[in-house]
Image: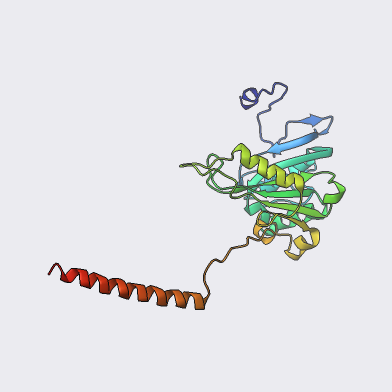
Amino acid sequence: MNMFLHGIEDFQISRGDTLRQPAFFAADRLKTFDCVIANPPFSLKEWGAENWANDPFGRNIAGVPPKGNGDMAWVQHMIKSMNSTGRMTVVLPHGALFRKGAEGKIRKKLLEDDLLEAVIGLGPNIFYGTQLAACAMVFKQNKDLDKKDKVLFIDGSDQVRVGRAQNYLETEHINQLFDWYNENKDVENYVKVASMTDIEENDFNLNIPLYVEKIIEDNLPSVEEALSNLKTAWAESQKAEKKFKTILKDFI
């Protein structure tokens, strides 16, 4: 229905369990595509970990995700579904950026293979069914030369229109995020191009605040200014009280 509503007529939909039994094949291998996009179920528990170590489709390219969380299984399935020049974007909870253990090892391998191009932090409460803030991870089979051994971090957490029960990602916000992604350069408070050395120093943790530092403007007065203001305010209050008492005598 979503395809029809957006005017897309050339498509094929298969209902099933993607991680246990993928539906798209070319000969005896997974079918690959120019572009792979998905918003899979966040942190899926019963996702099929029992079959992943010996996955017949070769999708465990970076390791076996934890039994109780399938986020990195989706990532690896999608990477395996890219063709030799393909690209992909997946929407995941922020935990996928920094959780340790098996997921940390998978993240490290994908980074060492230089597949991750960008991490885009999205605002909270923009998806139905969850108020959590999510992130979009952009992968590319063959990154452009100027993007190799680097990852673009974008903090788009304030790029939303706040609503009563839900927030909304408007066209202006989408355009801003795309411009930052397309320009691929540092923007104070919002964008950072991090080197693989930077990421390695953070133990392959991709948590966005580690790279995009928010500059907090401190408009507080100095101690001397505050003391001077206090003395002035006290003098003014004394003057006002004296005037009030003078006026009050006329009514007694």
Give me the residue at 74% from left, 37% from top. 36
Left or right? Give the position of 79 relative to 47. Answer: right
Coloring basis for residues: rainbow
Q: Examine the rendered structure and indicate whether residue 178 appears above or below residue 147.
A: above
Please tell me which residue lies in front, 74 or 252: 252
x and y, in percent, of residue 50 in the image: 69, 46
x and y, in percent, of residue 184 in the image: 76, 49
Quadrant where the N terminus sits is top right
x and y, in percent, of residue 31 in the image: 80, 33
Left or right? Give the position of 189 relative to 145. Answer: left
x and y, in percent, of residue 197 in the image: 80, 62
Give me the residue at 31% from left, 75% from top. 238
The residue furthest left is 252
The number of numbered badges drawn on the structure is 0
Please tell me which residue lies in front, 203 or 104: 203
Please tell me which residue lies in front, 244 or 209: 244
